[in-house]
Image (tube, helix red, strand yellow):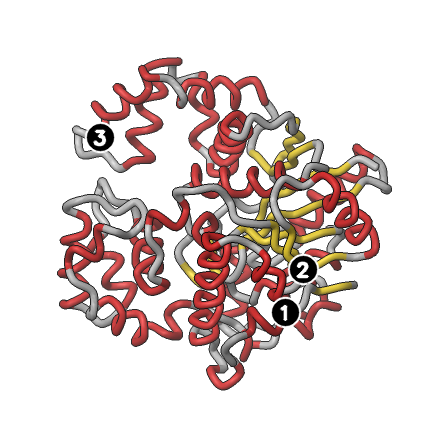
Amino acid sequence: MQVIGIIAEYNPFHSGHRHQIQEIRRHHGKDCAIVCAMSGNWVQRGDAALLDKWQRSALALGGGADLILELPTPWALSSAEGFARGGVGILAATGIVEQLSFGCESRDVDALKAAASCLDTEAFSVALKQSLEKGLSFPVARQQAVEVLIGSQAAACMKTPNNNLGIEYIRALKHHNSSISLFPIPRLGSGHHSLEADREHASASFLRQQLLAGIPSTQLAPFLDPQDAHLFAPASFTALHFAQRAVFARLRTMKESDFLALPDCTEGLHHRLYQAALTWEDLDTLYQTVKSRRYTHSRIRRLVLAAFLELQETHRSGPLPYLRVLGMNKRGQTLLRQMKQRATLPILTKAAHIHALGAREQELFALEARCTDLYALCRRGFGDGKGKQEYRQNPVIV
């Protein structure tokens, strides 16, 4: 049985994700297995996932996935490089994943590999520093540095978000010394952050906007499956702005020096964040105030969320702690039995299993549990968000 891996957020799972799984099985046969490394309750854009990780696991399993493993929050809430290293690390540690499938704007794997190789050179580091010294944002400086080294035509693949993530997956595979091969699938329909939809596919950004605005999920077919409507209860929708008073309470109790300990926070930026937190009382205004040519909106959002969750750079400085199972079907249970023989990280199917692991693993699990408790505060229906869910919830089985 061939095993294909996917790294995703499924925020929420939609027709484009279903198409990817269908394409995998069209190429590899209906009996191939699909393992997903999925972000937990917090996502890379610096926000709470619309639905919790167990609800999103149920959606993914219903859409054709077989086994859902959690990408821990310190890696899920990271730049593209950290996100890719975490996701690839999870899939590689299973010991059973043979290929990594990802959506991209181009299937020219050689171009993606050329860009990835360039990013790992000393010459790139020098060129990037020179571009950043011009006051450019990191994404623009990165693009400019690669164009200087390999030419604008060769670097053109880096101008779109899914290609960029694919490049980071290639780098991460090299970092983990993994033999997992690549299976890119061209992205269809609306762009990554598009707030419009075509006839068959819509971006996750568009769907979140519609759902949070009160549009019933049954009216968003074919992007969302009507049979999943029971999972899209508006009271269970979650977003950071539903708990922005709690976020500002955390920010205003931090010292200026505390901001420097946040992941990817540099001198200068920590001062801007500290001052904005004392000045403003609306998250969108804070983001816009701190944002600049050099500091992107998404980076600011991640830093604010990291502050709320009390994440620090040290939390992701070491190896991944374990493989946390969020959901599975019968084929996924077979995969899990194989993993118990081949995996290079301990496997957690129950919270109680953490007590058999070391101090660092227990510390990161406790961090994840705290992040889940804070996630409950961000639910639109606040009274539905009980604490200690991390210790009570078993994997979803379908």
Q: Position of residue 11 (x, y in %)?
A: 55, 57
Between discs 3 and 2, the one toward the N terminus:
3
248 left or right of 13? left
In this figure, which residue is indicated by the disc labeled 3?
A: 132
Label 1's element? helix
Q: Nearer the viewer, mark 2 or mark 1?
A: 2
Three-letter code, disc 2: Thr
Sequence-wise, which precedes: disc 1 or disc 3? 3
Q: Please tell me which residue is depicted at 39% across the width and 13% down the height of the picture.
A: 150
Q: Which residue is label 2 attached to?
A: 349
Where is 243 relative to 185, above or below? below
Q: Reading the chain from its start, which is encountered first: label 2 or label 1?
A: 1
Question: Residue 103 is drawn in which quadrant?
Answer: top right
Foreground residue, 290 or 69? 69
Task: Pinpoint residue 152: horizontal percent, then vertical percent.
Answer: 38, 18
Question: Is 210 located above or below residue 342 in the figure?
Answer: below
- Residue 321 higher or lower than 11, as above or below: above
Q: Quadrant of residue 2?
A: top right
Per the rendering, the mark at residue 109 is none
The reply to whether residue 315 is in sight is yes
- Give the amino acid type for the residue marked by disc 1 in the picture: Ser
Q: In x, y percent, where is residue 139? A: 33, 35
Amino acid type for the residue under numbered disc 3: Leu
- Which residue shows up at 54% across the image and 58% down it? 40
Residue furthest to the bottom in view is 383
Q: Is residue 199 visible?
A: no
Q: CA gap, disc 1 to disc 3?
A: 43 Å
Q: Are marks 3 and 2 in contact (CB under 8 Å)?
A: no
Quick one: quadrant of the C terminus? Answer: bottom right
Determine which residue is flagged by label 1: 217
Instruction: Tell me the SS state at disc 2.
Output: loop
Q: Answer left or right for 61 relative to 361.
A: right
